[in-house]
Amino acid sequence: MAVQYRSYLILLFVLVGLAVVLLVPGIAITQRLWGAEALAGLYWACGLCFTAATLGGLPLLMAGRSPQETGTLALGSMAVRMGITLFGALAITLATDVPRTHFLLWLVVCYFVFLIAEIGFILQRTRPE
């Protein structure tokens, strides 16, 4: 059981590292191309995708004994992540004054970067020991 929590903590550290890797050049690129007002879209997109990725990894903490259970948990994890991202993006674009173009552009970039981390986590969790 402790191995599961340790692997989830490793996922969280990887996600934090990826967020930093996205934000450092993202801030420079966004400011240079679109100005300082577009940075809000970057922050909202990165925060939403980070939250979705951390919550999406939670179903994988349940130990799947068979390959079918593990596959089902992996699909559930990705569904949770996608649902949080979609509903969050809808809420942010409709309820806030965040620049939509910049938010949606960075949302796509952040989603796929964090998706790589989640797939790596799923593959590590489903690897036979």
Image (cartoon, rainbow, N blue to C red):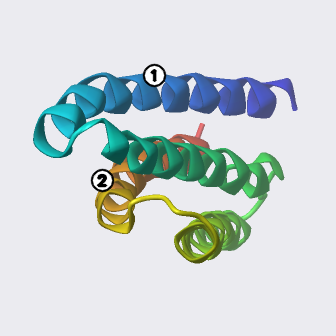
> Is residue 24 or residue 126 the one in the foreground?
24
> Is residue 77 or residue 89 the one in the foreground?
89
Which image quadrant is residue 117 in?
top left
- Residue positioned most to the left: 33
The quarter of the image holding the C terminus is top right
What residue would you read off at disc 1?
17
| Secondary structure at numbered mark 1 | helix
On screen, residue 75 above or below 105:
below
| Secondary structure at numbered mark 2 | helix
Could you say where residue 38 lies in the image, as x and y percent from the top left?
33, 47
On screen, residue 119 above or below 23:
below
Residue at image position (58%, 52%) is 48
Q: Is residue 124 visible?
A: yes
Residue at image position (72%, 64%) is 66
Q: Amino acid at mark 1?
A: Gly
Residue at image position (12%, 42%) is 33
Mark closest to the chain's N terminus, 2 or 1? 1
Which image quadrant is residue 86 in?
bottom right
The quarter of the image holding the N terminus is top right
